[in-house]
Amino acid sequence: DVERIVGLFLNTVPARVALRPGEPVRDLLARLQADRGELLAHEHVSLGVVQRDAGLGQLFDTLFVLQNFAGGADAPDGFMAEHGIVDVGSLDATHYALSVVVRPLARVQVILAFRPDLLDRSLVEAVLARYLRVLDRLCADVDAPVGAIDPVGAGERDRLAAEWASTAHDLPDATVA
């Protein structure tokens, strides 16, 4: 009956995803869904408690948000009028280095929010391009092995190879000692 309750209920739950290179995408997605289902019983635990109990410092610096709640301009016809809503607006910011927000509307919307004091805009744009490339590959062939999905495009791969090669230099024939 959550759809009858006023309020936005969410909690940040850290999750580690193990990628198995030979695992088909379809199996990875099924495993992630099952793992996520097992976490539901623990969603009442606050992020602060999880971080304290893990005994680590910062658990993560990147946030993935699936915004799948109804309302706003993307709501079904009549939704706002039916519930007496006359306008919807929001202002959001992130305190994480990078936040990826996905909204499954008629056309999926992907929003990247980042802290410009920590990340350069060109880096974030490259991350977005890689993310979209991976999504395209995932949708194109769910039976492909996860290890075959390359987030780096050919042009970027050539540029990276050239940058890495430019650091090559002759080493003296001597040991560290």
Image (cartoon, rainbow, N blue to C red):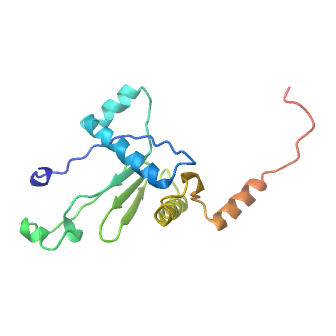
Q: Is 87 displayed left or right of 35 in the figure?
A: left
Decide: is 144 above or below 17.
Answer: below
Residue 176 lies, in percent from the top left, at: 84, 29
**Which image quarter: residue 100?**
bottom left
**Which image quarter: residue 158?**
bottom right
Q: Residue at x 20, y 67 (%)?
A: 72
Q: Is residue 92 visible?
A: yes
**Which image quarter: residue 77?**
bottom left
Decide: is 104 above or below 39.
Answer: below
Q: Residue at x 10, y 66 (%)?
A: 85
Q: Is 63 displayed left or right of 152 in the figure?
A: left
Numbered circles on residues, count: 0
Q: Residue at x 53, y 57 (%)?
A: 120
Residue 131 lies, in percent from the top left, at: 49, 60
In this view, the residue in front, 134 or 47, is 134
Q: Residue furthest right?
A: 173
Q: Is 81 displayed left or right of 101 in the figure?
A: left
Residue 80 lies, in percent from the top left, at: 12, 68
Q: Is residue 86 visible?
A: no
Q: Residue at x 9, y 53 (%)?
A: 4
In this view, the residue in front, 169 or 130, is 130
Decide: is 88 above or below 8.
Answer: below
Residue 118 lies, in percent from the top left, at: 49, 50
Question: The C terminus lies in which quarter of the figure?
Answer: top right
